[in-house]
Image (spheres, rainbow, N blue to C red):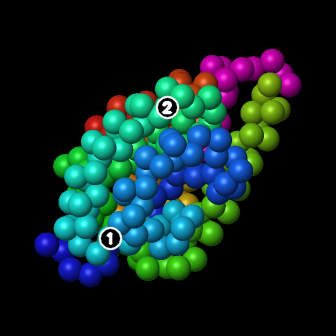
Amino acid sequence: MMDGVLTWLLCFLLVTVASYRDCPGLYNCERPIRDERIFAAAESMVFNIRDEQVLDRICRKLNTLKRCYTTQAQTCNNEYNKMDVAFFRDVIEYICSPAGRTVALATSAARCHLDSALNQWFLEMIHGCAYTFHEQIRKLKAQGKGAQSPEACAKKLLLDACVQTNMNEKCGPQMEVLMEKQWAFWSSYDYAEYTCAVDVDNILARK
Protein backbone atom coordinates (compact mmCIF):
# COMPACT_ATOMS: atom_id res chain seq x y z
CA MET A 1 0.00 0.00 0.00
CA MET A 2 1.23 3.50 -0.74
CA ASP A 3 1.01 5.94 2.17
CA GLY A 4 0.04 9.58 1.98
CA VAL A 5 -2.14 11.48 -0.41
CA LEU A 6 -1.88 10.71 -4.11
CA THR A 7 -3.11 13.74 -5.98
CA TRP A 8 -3.34 14.13 -9.71
CA LEU A 9 -5.05 16.16 -12.32
CA LEU A 10 -7.97 14.59 -14.17
CA CYS A 11 -8.08 16.91 -17.12
CA PHE A 12 -11.57 16.49 -18.44
CA LEU A 13 -13.54 19.62 -19.22
CA LEU A 14 -16.66 19.02 -17.14
CA VAL A 15 -19.63 21.33 -17.65
CA THR A 16 -19.72 23.49 -14.54
CA VAL A 17 -22.99 25.30 -15.19
CA ALA A 18 -25.77 23.18 -13.75
CA SER A 19 -28.38 24.51 -16.18
CA TYR A 20 -26.37 23.05 -19.07
CA ARG A 21 -26.81 19.57 -17.64
CA ASP A 22 -29.98 18.54 -19.40
CA CYS A 23 -29.65 14.87 -18.41
CA PRO A 24 -29.47 14.68 -14.59
CA GLY A 25 -30.00 10.92 -14.63
CA LEU A 26 -26.87 10.56 -16.72
CA TYR A 27 -24.79 12.69 -14.35
CA ASN A 28 -26.15 10.70 -11.42
CA CYS A 29 -24.17 7.78 -12.81
CA GLU A 30 -21.06 9.54 -11.53
CA ARG A 31 -22.42 9.91 -7.99
CA PRO A 32 -21.22 6.60 -6.44
CA ILE A 33 -17.65 7.48 -7.38
CA ARG A 34 -17.99 11.15 -6.50
CA ASP A 35 -19.36 10.11 -3.11
CA GLU A 36 -15.92 8.75 -2.35
CA ARG A 37 -15.01 12.44 -1.90
CA ILE A 38 -11.86 12.08 -3.93
CA PHE A 39 -12.31 15.51 -5.49
CA ALA A 40 -10.58 18.44 -3.85
CA ALA A 41 -13.75 20.47 -4.45
CA ALA A 42 -17.17 19.96 -6.01
CA GLU A 43 -16.13 21.00 -9.52
CA SER A 44 -12.40 20.48 -9.15
CA MET A 45 -10.29 18.69 -11.72
CA VAL A 46 -7.97 17.49 -8.95
CA PHE A 47 -8.39 14.10 -7.29
CA ASN A 48 -7.10 13.27 -3.83
CA ILE A 49 -6.44 9.54 -3.48
CA ARG A 50 -5.34 8.64 0.03
CA ASP A 51 -3.99 5.21 -0.83
CA GLU A 52 -4.49 2.19 -3.05
CA GLN A 53 -7.47 1.05 -0.99
CA VAL A 54 -9.38 4.14 -2.08
CA LEU A 55 -8.55 3.44 -5.69
CA ASP A 56 -9.68 -0.17 -5.24
CA ARG A 57 -13.01 1.04 -3.88
CA ILE A 58 -13.47 3.36 -6.84
CA CYS A 59 -12.66 0.60 -9.29
CA ARG A 60 -15.22 -1.74 -7.74
CA LYS A 61 -17.85 0.81 -8.78
CA LEU A 62 -16.70 0.96 -12.38
CA ASN A 63 -19.10 -1.67 -13.73
CA THR A 64 -22.04 0.09 -12.09
CA LEU A 65 -20.95 3.35 -13.73
CA LYS A 66 -20.71 1.68 -17.14
CA ARG A 67 -24.13 0.00 -16.88
CA CYS A 68 -25.73 3.22 -15.69
CA TYR A 69 -24.23 5.17 -18.58
CA THR A 70 -25.47 2.66 -21.15
CA THR A 71 -29.02 2.88 -19.75
CA GLN A 72 -29.21 6.63 -19.16
CA ALA A 73 -27.56 7.61 -22.45
CA GLN A 74 -30.47 6.05 -24.33
CA THR A 75 -32.85 8.74 -23.03
CA CYS A 76 -30.44 11.69 -23.10
CA ASN A 77 -30.73 13.96 -26.15
CA ASN A 78 -27.87 16.27 -25.19
CA GLU A 79 -24.80 15.03 -27.04
CA TYR A 80 -22.43 17.18 -24.99
CA ASN A 81 -23.78 15.72 -21.74
CA LYS A 82 -23.27 12.21 -23.12
CA MET A 83 -19.75 13.09 -24.22
CA ASP A 84 -18.99 14.59 -20.81
CA VAL A 85 -20.08 11.56 -18.78
CA ALA A 86 -18.56 9.13 -21.31
CA PHE A 87 -15.25 10.89 -20.76
CA PHE A 88 -15.61 10.50 -16.99
CA ARG A 89 -16.34 6.81 -17.52
CA ASP A 90 -13.37 6.33 -19.85
CA VAL A 91 -10.92 8.02 -17.49
CA ILE A 92 -12.09 5.96 -14.51
CA GLU A 93 -11.83 2.82 -16.61
CA TYR A 94 -8.29 3.77 -17.59
CA ILE A 95 -7.04 4.47 -14.05
CA CYS A 96 -8.54 1.12 -13.00
CA SER A 97 -6.56 -0.76 -15.67
CA PRO A 98 -3.16 -2.20 -14.73
CA ALA A 99 -1.31 0.38 -16.81
CA GLY A 100 -3.55 3.21 -15.64
CA ARG A 101 -3.11 2.37 -11.96
CA THR A 102 0.65 2.50 -12.36
CA VAL A 103 0.48 5.85 -14.13
CA ALA A 104 -1.99 7.35 -11.64
CA LEU A 105 -0.12 6.23 -8.54
CA ALA A 106 3.20 7.43 -10.00
CA THR A 107 1.89 11.00 -10.13
CA SER A 108 2.39 11.26 -6.36
CA ALA A 109 5.99 12.09 -7.31
CA ALA A 110 4.93 15.03 -9.49
CA ARG A 111 6.16 18.35 -8.13
CA CYS A 112 2.72 19.96 -8.50
CA HIS A 113 0.56 17.22 -6.98
CA LEU A 114 -0.26 19.27 -3.88
CA ASP A 115 -0.66 22.58 -5.70
CA SER A 116 -4.07 23.97 -4.72
CA ALA A 117 -4.03 26.32 -7.71
CA LEU A 118 -3.37 23.54 -10.24
CA ASN A 119 -6.98 23.29 -11.40
CA GLN A 120 -7.24 26.98 -12.27
CA TRP A 121 -3.84 26.96 -13.95
CA PHE A 122 -4.85 23.94 -16.03
CA LEU A 123 -8.10 25.48 -17.26
CA GLU A 124 -6.30 28.68 -18.25
CA MET A 125 -3.58 26.68 -20.02
CA ILE A 126 -6.14 24.63 -21.97
CA HIS A 127 -7.98 27.80 -22.97
CA GLY A 128 -4.76 29.36 -24.27
CA CYS A 129 -3.76 26.30 -26.30
CA ALA A 130 -7.29 25.84 -27.69
CA TYR A 131 -7.65 29.52 -28.57
CA THR A 132 -4.48 29.43 -30.64
CA PHE A 133 -5.65 26.24 -32.34
CA HIS A 134 -9.10 27.57 -33.25
CA GLU A 135 -7.64 30.80 -34.62
CA GLN A 136 -5.33 28.76 -36.85
CA ILE A 137 -8.22 26.53 -37.98
CA ARG A 138 -10.37 29.59 -38.72
CA LYS A 139 -7.69 30.88 -41.07
CA LEU A 140 -7.35 27.49 -42.75
CA LYS A 141 -11.11 27.26 -43.28
CA ALA A 142 -11.01 30.68 -44.93
CA GLN A 143 -8.55 29.11 -47.39
CA GLY A 144 -10.93 26.21 -48.03
CA LYS A 145 -8.92 23.69 -46.01
CA GLY A 146 -11.06 21.40 -43.87
CA ALA A 147 -10.49 19.26 -40.77
CA GLN A 148 -9.01 16.39 -42.78
CA SER A 149 -6.44 18.53 -44.58
CA PRO A 150 -2.76 17.94 -43.77
CA GLU A 151 -2.52 21.54 -42.56
CA ALA A 152 -5.40 21.10 -40.09
CA CYS A 153 -3.97 17.82 -38.83
CA ALA A 154 -0.64 19.51 -38.24
CA LYS A 155 -2.36 22.21 -36.18
CA LYS A 156 -4.13 19.53 -34.10
CA LEU A 157 -0.78 17.90 -33.38
CA LEU A 158 0.52 21.30 -32.27
CA LEU A 159 -2.48 21.61 -29.93
CA ASP A 160 -1.65 18.20 -28.43
CA ALA A 161 1.97 19.24 -28.00
CA CYS A 162 0.96 22.55 -26.40
CA VAL A 163 -1.03 20.78 -23.69
CA GLN A 164 1.54 18.07 -23.06
CA THR A 165 4.55 20.39 -23.02
CA ASN A 166 2.88 22.80 -20.61
CA MET A 167 2.01 19.94 -18.26
CA ASN A 168 5.56 18.63 -18.37
CA GLU A 169 7.00 22.06 -17.62
CA LYS A 170 4.54 22.64 -14.79
CA CYS A 171 4.49 19.23 -13.14
CA GLY A 172 7.17 17.02 -14.63
CA PRO A 173 6.99 13.79 -16.67
CA GLN A 174 4.86 11.86 -14.16
CA MET A 175 1.87 14.15 -14.64
CA GLU A 176 2.53 14.55 -18.35
CA VAL A 177 2.02 10.82 -18.91
CA LEU A 178 -1.41 10.86 -17.27
CA MET A 179 -2.26 14.08 -19.08
CA GLU A 180 -1.42 12.47 -22.41
CA LYS A 181 -3.82 9.60 -21.77
CA GLN A 182 -6.67 11.83 -20.68
CA TRP A 183 -6.14 14.35 -23.46
CA ALA A 184 -6.32 11.49 -25.98
CA PHE A 185 -9.73 10.53 -24.58
CA TRP A 186 -11.04 14.10 -24.63
CA SER A 187 -9.72 14.71 -28.14
CA SER A 188 -11.49 11.61 -29.41
CA TYR A 189 -14.77 13.29 -28.40
CA ASP A 190 -14.30 17.05 -28.69
CA TYR A 191 -11.96 16.98 -31.71
CA ALA A 192 -13.45 13.92 -33.40
CA GLU A 193 -13.34 15.52 -36.84
CA TYR A 194 -9.54 15.60 -36.66
CA THR A 195 -9.27 11.81 -36.75
CA CYS A 196 -6.11 12.01 -38.82
CA ALA A 197 -4.31 13.34 -35.75
CA VAL A 198 -5.99 11.32 -32.98
CA ASP A 199 -5.34 7.65 -32.33
CA VAL A 200 -6.44 6.78 -28.79
CA ASP A 201 -5.61 3.07 -29.07
CA ASN A 202 -2.07 3.86 -30.14
CA ILE A 203 -1.60 6.37 -27.34
CA LEU A 204 -2.97 4.00 -24.71
CA ALA A 205 -0.57 1.30 -25.89
CA ARG A 206 2.39 3.44 -24.86
CA LYS A 207 4.00 2.62 -21.55
Provide residue 122's location: percent of width, then percent of height: 59, 63
Q: In this view, does 113 lie to the left or right of 146?
A: left
Q: Image quadrant for the N terminus?
A: bottom left
Residue nearest the observer in this picture, 36 or 124: 36
* Image: 81 above or below 124: above
Q: Mark 1 points at which residue?
A: 49
Q: Residue at x 63, y 20 (%)?
A: 148
Provide residue 194's location: percent of width, then percent of height: 59, 27
Tell me the tag on residue 79: none
Q: Which of marks 1 and 2 is nearer the N terminus?
A: 1
* Image: 140 above or below 53: above
Q: Name the residue under label 2.
A: 73
Residue segment shown in magenta: 142-159
Q: Which residue is drawn at 75% across and 20% down?
A: 145
Provide residue 171's location: percent of width, then percent of height: 46, 69
Task: Identify the element where label 2 is drawn.
Answer: helix
Mark yes or no: residue 168 visible.
no
Q: Residue furthest toward the left?
A: 1
* Image: 54 above or below 102: below
Residue nearest the observer in this picture, 153 or 198: 198
At label 1, counting other C-alpha atoms closer than 10 Å, the crowd grade (few under 14, some 14-19, many 20 or more) is many
Q: Mark 2 belongs to which amino acid?
A: Ala
Could you say which quadrant of the image residue 177 lies in? bottom left
Q: Residue at x 83, y 22 (%)?
A: 143
Q: Which residue is drawn at 69% across and 55% down?
A: 17
Q: Mark 1 belongs to which amino acid?
A: Ile
Q: Does the magenta stretch include residue 145?
A: yes
